């Protein structure tokens, strides 16, 4: 399984299936954000990371332009990730309360973090064909994570696209509706839990707070049995 995931991640970082996304990555890498002007941007598709025997998956829609696309690791180097890892540390899912770059010694406890789409799309709005192109990578991650029991989707857009992906693989109804903290049993007996996105907007408007996020991840850990 280790070899499969490693080979998958190498394939992901070399992927150029979607010209629009490939060109956008080049643009981001060239036209850096001012505060990161001295940084060497990753500027490639961003693979998932974490434990290969993970019982929990944390799933976003796509890497951030100046977060994962800059650092090479999902939910790393941006404000959403900063808030997320405060909770993951508090609930003992990670060994530290920050995720700055791929060399910061971060370790996850029985958890794998990834995105449905491995490249940041312009305006954070992927095209359907881009999601379909990338779905094979996400499906391979699901297949390789044999012990996976619980999937937490961060944000309604990630939740909706996760359901669309499952509908391509399973005959499922439209009963799945986004509601923070609700638990769904999927056709493969895994548990799906929608979660508000840990974005600065949601945090600043108090749609999501650290207590809510801690409670959700504590529940996810209990259901995943680790």
Image (spheres, grey):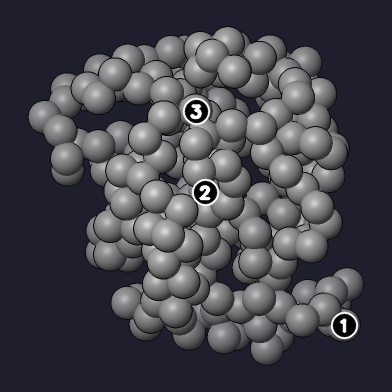
Mark 3 or mark 1: name the one nearer the start of the chain: 1
User: Mark 3 and mark 1: span between their CA atoms?
Assistant: 38 Å
Disc ID at residue 55? 3
Say if 157 sits above or below 31 in the image: above
- At a point 52% along the width and 79% down the height, the residue shown is 24
Answer whether residue 151 is visible to the viewer in this image.
yes
Where is residue 176 drawn, in percent x and y?
Answer: 31, 21
**Which class describes the residues within 10 Å of circle 3: few (<14), some (14-19), or many (20+)?**
many
In primary-sequence order, the first of circles 3 and 2 is: 3
Q: Quadrant of the C terminus?
A: top right
Kindly give the residue lying farthest to the left in the view shown: 171
Q: Which residue is mark 1?
A: 38
Quarter where residue 206 is shown: top right
Tag 3 near tag 2, CB within 8 Å: no
1 or 2: tag closer to the N-terminus: 1
Q: How many marks?
A: 3
Question: Where does the image place residue 123, in percent across and percent down from the top left?
Answer: 53, 63
Mark 1 secondary-structure assignment: loop
Q: Residue at x 66, y 76 (%)?
A: 42
């Amino acid at each position: 399984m280790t070899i499969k995931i490693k080979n998958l991640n190498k394939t992901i970082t070399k992927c150029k299936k979607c010209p629009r996304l490939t060109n956008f990555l080049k643009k981001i890498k060239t036209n850096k954000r001012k505060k990161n002007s001295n940084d060497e941007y990753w500027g490639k598709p961003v693979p998932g990371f974490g434990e290969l025997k993970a019982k929990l998956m944390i799933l976003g829609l796509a890497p951030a332009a100046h977060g994962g696309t800059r650092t090479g690791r999902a939910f790393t180097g941006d404000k959403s990730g900063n808030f997320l890892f405060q909770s993951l540390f508090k609930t003992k899912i990670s060994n530290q309360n920050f995720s700055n770059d791929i060399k910061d010694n971060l370790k996850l406890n029985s958890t794998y973090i990834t995105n449905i789409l491995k490249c940041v799309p312009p305006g954070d709005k992927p095209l359907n064909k881009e999601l379909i192109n990338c779905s094979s990578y996400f499906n391979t991650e699901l297949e390789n994570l044999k012990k996976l029991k619980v999937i937490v989707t961060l944000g309604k857009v990630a939740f909706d696209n996760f359901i669309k992906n499952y509908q391509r693989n399973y005959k499922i109804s439209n009963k799945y509706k986004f509601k923070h903290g609700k638990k769904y049993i999927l056709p493969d007996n895994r548990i799906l839990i929608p979660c508000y996105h840990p974005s600065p907007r949601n945090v600043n408007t108090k749609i999501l707070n650290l207590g809510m996020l801690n409670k959700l991840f504590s529940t996810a850990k209990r259901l995943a049995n680790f």
